[in-house]
Image (spheres, rainbow, N blue to C red):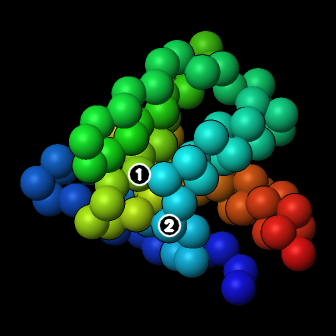
Amino acid sequence: MKVSYTRFYNSDKQRLEFLLVDYDYIDGNEKLAELFKTEYGYELIDSIDGIWFKTIRIATKDSFYELLWHEDTGNCIYCITQSEKENSLLEKRLQRVLKLLNDLLM
């Protein structure tokens, strides 16, 4: 299977999220964070383990993302600063990172 994503507007949180399809792994976001670091220089800010969720925060000097795994929804990524420009940039970067991930999984 190939990992892909779908755009989802979370009206409860008022943010655009990119939900990963065929990639529901509790530790899957660690690999994504590693690929964002390798490709774009993102650094790990922190990681929070909850009972039903796990959040990883990564950032550069210009962008700040959260990678979330939740037992009900799986893996997703979103911008902390919700703007059209930031969401567009994240989507482009996510496309590249997922291509790299899929190449690793083949």
Separation of residues labelled 2 and 1 (CA atoms)? 8 Å
* Residue that extends furthest to the bottom in the rendered view of this protein: 1
Q: Residues within 10 Å of mark 2 (few under 14, many from 20)?
A: some
Residue 7 appears in which quarter of the rendering? bottom left
Residue 49 appears in which quarter of the rendering? top left
- Which residue appears at 78% of the width and 60% of the height? 101
Q: Is residue 6 above or below residue 89?
A: below
Q: Is residue 45 above or below residue 56?
A: above
Residue 25 visible from this viewpoint: yes
Q: How crowded is mark 1: few (under 14 residues within 10 Å), some or many (20 or more)?
A: many
| Quadrant housing the N terminus | bottom right
Residue 24, how many percent across, how many down? 50, 67
Q: Is tag 2's residue or tag 1's residue first in the polypeptide sequence?
A: 2
Left or right: residue 44 compared with residue 83: right
Residue 100, how many percent across, how many down? 84, 58
Rendered image: mark on residue 24: 2
Amino acid marked by disc 2: Asp
94 and 24: which is toward the camera: 24
Asked whether the beta carbons under mark 2 and mark 1 sit within 8 Å of each other, the answer is: yes
Amino acid marked by disc 1: Trp
105 and 90: which is toward the camera: 105
- Which residue appears at 88% of the width and 67% of the height? 103
Residue 14, how many percent across, how many down? 18, 49
Left or right: residue 36 compared with residue 69: right
* Residue carrying label 1: 69
The tally of labels here is 2
Left or right: residue 99 compared with residue 91: right
- Which residue appears at 48% of the width and 33% of the height? 56
